[in-house]
Amino acid sequence: MRHVSYGCCPGLLPIFGPSGVAAPADAPGSSGPEPKSAGPVDRNALLDLAAAARILAAEGVVDAFGHVSMRHPESPDRYLMSRSCAPALQTADDIIEYDLDSTPINANGRGSFLERYIHGQLYRSRPDVMAVVHSHSPSVIPYGLTGLPMRAMYHNAAFLAAGVPVFRVEEKFGATNMLVSDNRMGQELARVIGDKAVALMRAHGSVACGPSLQIAVFRAVYTEVSARVQQAALAHGLSISALSAEEGRLADETNVTACMRAWDLWRSQVRF
């Protein structure tokens, strides 16, 4: 690979636009100057973010829809997320920088996800969150519709034992198209999730977050798996002995480090 100097630290690259050149400070067609970029991001971090989207697709958490983001590694008031495209197709060159109002910094003509406000407002309200996944994973959706609580069915899903709140968009915004399409809605979703790792979205999907990209992906995957296990357990018609809150807390302490085994496997299977 040919190495080009961009006047920044070695190994750090600007986030590219579709033309393969660094995006200008003021994108064509914008109504005014964009917020200033937080600076270049290590290419390996961008590759991991694109890989995360592909992992979520491979694990059945997202399909043509859904998205994953990470907080900018050098600036907590910025986050990174792909342009609007199917997760399984994302590459490092698709990634756009956003401020916490979800204004694109360097879109350079690339489209943004309509529900990016989920991400910006979660980062704003939760300094501990470093990555966010929004999905419509099919086994999870029924729990946001029925009022049946989602529970932590086994140790890999221990984070669910702290509780899984449900965001009911109609309670504050009335009848909508179910999309979190502005900052007000994003703020309300962030309020509902509170300090939890996962929140359901009625008739829509869910949000998972974590203190790293790897943990957020782990939680999104095992939320879907735990939902399937819970459905299987319910079919027996007997009481379910799910993890207690304290069991969940203890098990999740182990998962925070053990999740890297899953990440290393999933990451090794991603091909660009």
Image (spheres, rainbow, N blue to C red):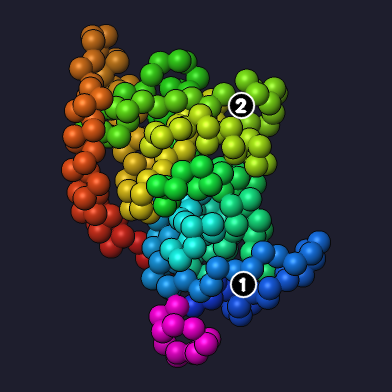
Magenta includes 5? yes
Pinpoint residue 182: horizontal percent, then vertical percent.
Answer: 67, 41
Mark 1 surroundings: few (<14), some (14-19) or many (≥20) residues within 10 A: many
Residue displayed at 41% across by 35% down: 195
Pinpoint residue 156: horizontal percent, then vertical percent.
Answer: 23, 37
Q: Quadrant of the N terminus?
A: bottom left
Pinpoint residue 79: horizontal percent, then vertical percent.
Answer: 52, 57
Secondary element type, mark 1:
loop
Residue displayed at 23% across by 22% down: 244
Give the spatial CA distance, label 1 vs label 2.
34 Å
Which one is earlier in the sequence, the residue at label 1 or at label 2? 1
Callout 2 amino acid: Val
Q: Compared to 86, does 248 lie above or below? A: above
Quarter where residue 202 is shown: top right
Viewer-nearest residue: 64 or 26: 26
Viewer-nearest residue: 256 or 55: 256
Pinpoint residue 255: horizontal percent, then vertical percent.
Answer: 22, 43
Magenta includes 247? no
Residue 65 visible in the snapshot: no
Q: Quadrant of the C terminus?
A: bottom left
Q: Compared to 98, does 236 lie above or below? A: above
Task: Look at mark 1 in the image and give the residue it sits on.
Answer: 17
Task: Look at mark 2 in the image and give the residue it sits on.
Answer: 169
Residue displayed at 43% across by 22% down: 143
